[in-house]
Amino acid sequence: MKTRFNEIKGRPFYIFLLVAWCAGPLILLLFYSLSDINSGYIDFKNYVNLLKDENFRTVMSNSLIVSTVSTFLSLSLATISAYAITRKSIRFGQAALFLFLAISMFPSIATLSPLYLIFREVGLRDTLISLIIPYTVFSLPIAIWMLSGYFKQIPKELELSAKMDGCSGFTIFWKILFPLLKSGLATTAILVFVTNWNEFIYAVAFTTTNLSRTLPIYISKFPTATDNVIGQLTASSVIGAIPLILIILFFQKRIVAGLTSGAVKE
Amino acid sequence: MHINKPKIIIITTVIIIGLILTVIMAGLFKQKSDNIKANSKVTTIVFAHYELQDSASFGNKTNAIKELIKKFEKIHPNIKVKEEILPNHSDIQHQYYVINLEGNTPNIDVLSMDVIWIKEFAKAGWILDLDKYIDRKDFQDFITPLFAGPITYNSKIYAFPWVLTSGALFYRKDLLDKYGFRSPQSFEELVKQSQYILEKENNPDLYGYLWQGNEQEGMVCNVLEYLYSLNGAILDGDKVVIDSPQNKKALAFLQSLFKSGVSPDTVKTSNLIINRRLFLQGHGIFMRDWSTSYKQITGKDSPLYGKAGMANMPHFEGYQSSPILGGHQLGINKSSKHPKEAYEFIKFITSPESQKFLAMNSLFLPSRHSVYKDEKLVKVYPFLKTYYEEIIPTIKSRPLDPYYVMFSSALQSEFSAIIVGRQSIDKSLKIAKDQIEFIIDISKEKNSRILTKCSNHDKKEKKE
Amino acid sequence: MNFLKKISLTSDEKRAALLMAPAIILIFFVAIIPIINIFYLSLFRKVLIFDITKFIGFDNYRHLLVDQRFWNSFLNNVNYSFFSVAIELVLGLTIALILNQSFKARWLIRTAILIPWILPTVIASKFWNIILDPQYGVANKILLNLHIIHTNINWLGDPFWAMKCAILVDVWKYTPFLSLLLLGGLQLIPKELYEAAILDGTNKLQSFKNITLPLLMPTMLVALLFRTMDSFSAFSVVYVLTNGGPADSTELMSLYSFKTLFQSLQFGYGAAISVVIFLCVLLISIVYLYSFSYKTKDVN
């Protein structure tokens, strides 16, 4: 009865279209990066050349360092803050949460120039730190927001009973809350990591040499669609997409849950 | 069971990422320790420039600049030269320099600059005044009438001329011969020839005239060649004269190229790379490019070997050809820690011997009189003689002003709007005029006395 | 004194404040101060290249009013935001309705749908750049073979098409995200409501209008809020795809601001444009939040 009501004609076809539309580009990228224009055979030389290229290796490691460090920092700070907001009885908790959410909505371009001037003044321009700082801070609000949601799901009684048993604040957090929070932390970490891995505007403004460039900047510097760079361009795009695709393959349920929870609940 | 599987996956991904990281880090550290070792003995200077040769045409040959650097390091064992290669796109290079120099980076020592930036960088105090280094006698060998304007600021020299290039017209010799044409002297002739050949050939993949319409500095150069040919101008002293009738006429001619089908719509956004690709594959009869592309387009490795030629830019009937000066000149970063070593390198790489070597082995065009007169070189590349005698005297500079890049940004928008037909010529030129006047207002804000002095100076140079 | 006592913190609050201090300090210095600073900066004529810094009051804003290029970018932005968000909403809703059912290959579909969302905008834009290349792009080849077009179209070079292509990339990138949000909302609607509707003899369209839409409204508004705000400060798609060209026909406000800031280092004027973007985003969020509270009251 239920299914018949929602039945839409030709659904498999639509779904096929949808999958092709979404995944097609990635497959084409893979195809371009593996095909040799001259011989037409499958060829890994684009990848080999890229991995041999010192600049590309630096850029790749920059991206990995910046995204992991900022994700780690942001998550640690956010966990403590979310704990404070939800676990302590404070008066302006909800207001603070909304304030955080509002900050996360700031357009990057609005904070770009003042931050640039500050970093330039203290000599941090064109360093990885100049990216780690804004990445950490601008992912903080959303991380706090999400983690607060997960904290709220954990019943307060657990904590109280542990307190009765004489556990210290830290032990309570580490032994009781943390295990329950693991999946929430993972979801938040994934979303924050993906955002930082893909971030473009701060990176393009603050980095000027390969010492601090991240992968999106490296890719954006390719001239468009010339025969001799198209292989490298697509190969580096595929390499840049690999961590993300792995994330989708292993954590898709979590991502969907994380993405929808914020919007649907509030 | 349900918990185990993801756990394994997580652990393996973490391990993989960790492995990648360690490999990369190991590579980085090795590189760094190499640098430190090197630093203890010799000074390393960084030479920022764009790639002189296009891999497409010189792919198998040795890289001429790298060869020269090796030679230099042999002569000066205590100096090591590291290259920082910039993308071949004027605006991107400019942005790179501006941000780095403004941040007082010591990580660039020698920088190759487009002719239009030198005054700007000098005014900003980012590059060294080279007056005390210069050997006046040797300096006369540089083609001074061309470079005196761009490389000086307040009567002081800030850069050494290095690569010379100018706008040039490339044409399909075989096609012109087939229909009994000579290379066009005027734009009107070019249009007639294109229309005739296009009609006779009746090939939908053949286009008449390719030029750069993409919104960037190169397009401004293209457009200025038409304005200048009709004796138009952007500035007359401090007065903005961009909305003159000559300019309007020249721009209307550009628009008409699309209407008459001489230029394809691709041109509205095409850049050098796209045009060259089309032309080399035989899709164009005429192409406006830089003279430095000569060997790439007509050389032995080119698919058009023997079929293509280069001529001076055409002019409007009854007027003069006005190819625009391009090319890169070498200066020293003021925050450089090794200005002396940097100067040694500049002296070496702009010397007649080095210029000859570059002219032989790359797309380089020399900036010295003596190199053009070198018999050996001219024997190998006879076009250098005609280029020196016929084209170089007609070359014109873009407006010489420290604020040129800001003007150009306004010009790029408005010229582009005209080319794609998004705005009327009158309206675009009015907006451009307003914008440039606004920038001139800014420029008067500070150091106004110096600036008026400098613009008088510019005027004199223009007259020369 | 009384007032101070009232706001004096409880011990729990003190501890919470201590725990939150690092995050709050960081946010204060890296987010709040710059936002205040940018308003201040916009009152200056500041050109870094020539070391010009001069207080000029509201002159930058006065120039904004007559700056054709700014108004062009503003209108482009309105155009871009309106069409991309509208198309994304309609498509997203359609996809969500199609997917709102148990079916096979859920894993595959979810993977596919997440790809556009997770790929960096830069890669997506570069990819479309390759596809839309006038000579070598697949788009022209396919359309030529299907006889839909007869000559190559210069997608990104023609001002008529360039903006539409930019919108297309935006739609490709964000529709799946939107459909996921809406799907989440749909799944919250109790199935019993539909069953009851069938018993009442209402048809599909009516039940969509009477049940699905009103109950989905809060989710839809939140999704719209996110997307509109995002698209008003959109940058990377156009930066990579066209860099604002041809003839500034795809130049959005962020891009104009960025170019002013980092190409000619006019920090004062660039800041003024950034302030306008910030105020636009703020205005949009206020409008949405207002209608949001209004709608929820209505439903209740």
Image (tube, rainbow, N blue to C red):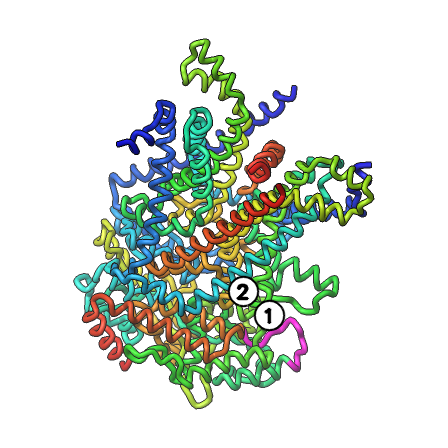
- Residue A241 badge: none
Residue on which the image places disc 2: B274
The Cα atoms of the two marked residues, 2 and 1, are separated by 13 Å
**A12 sits left or right of B46 in the view:** right
Q: What count of labels does the image hold?
A: 2
Residue B442 visible? The answer is: yes
Residue found at x 26% / y 75%: B458
Q: Which residues are magenta?
A: B199-210
Locate residue B199: give its quadrant.
Answer: bottom right
Residue found at x 67% / y 48%: C93
In front of the other: A71 or C185: C185
- Chain letter for mark 2, please: B
**B218 sits left or right of B285 in the view:** left
Residue found at x 34% / y 52%: C38
Residue found at x 51% / y 50%: C230
Q: Residue B297, relative to residue B31: is it above or below?
A: below
In front of the other: B71 or C251: C251
In front of the other: B160 or C98: C98
- Residue B282 badge: 1
Q: Is residue B111 in the magenta section? A: no
In front of the other: A12 or B208: A12
Whole-percent x and y of residue C51?
A: 25, 59
Of the residues shown, which amino acid type is indicated by label 1?
A: Gly
Q: Residue B119, relative to residue A16: is it above or below?
A: below
- Chain letter for mark 1, please: B
Whole-percent x and y of residue C123?
A: 54, 49
Of the residues shown, which amino acid type is indicated by label 2?
A: Ile
Q: Within 10 angstroms of label 1, few (less than 14), some, or many (20 or more) residues?
A: some
What kind of element bears circle 2? helix
Whole-percent x and y of residue C46?
A: 29, 59
Which residue, as the protein is rendered here, is positioned at the far top? A165
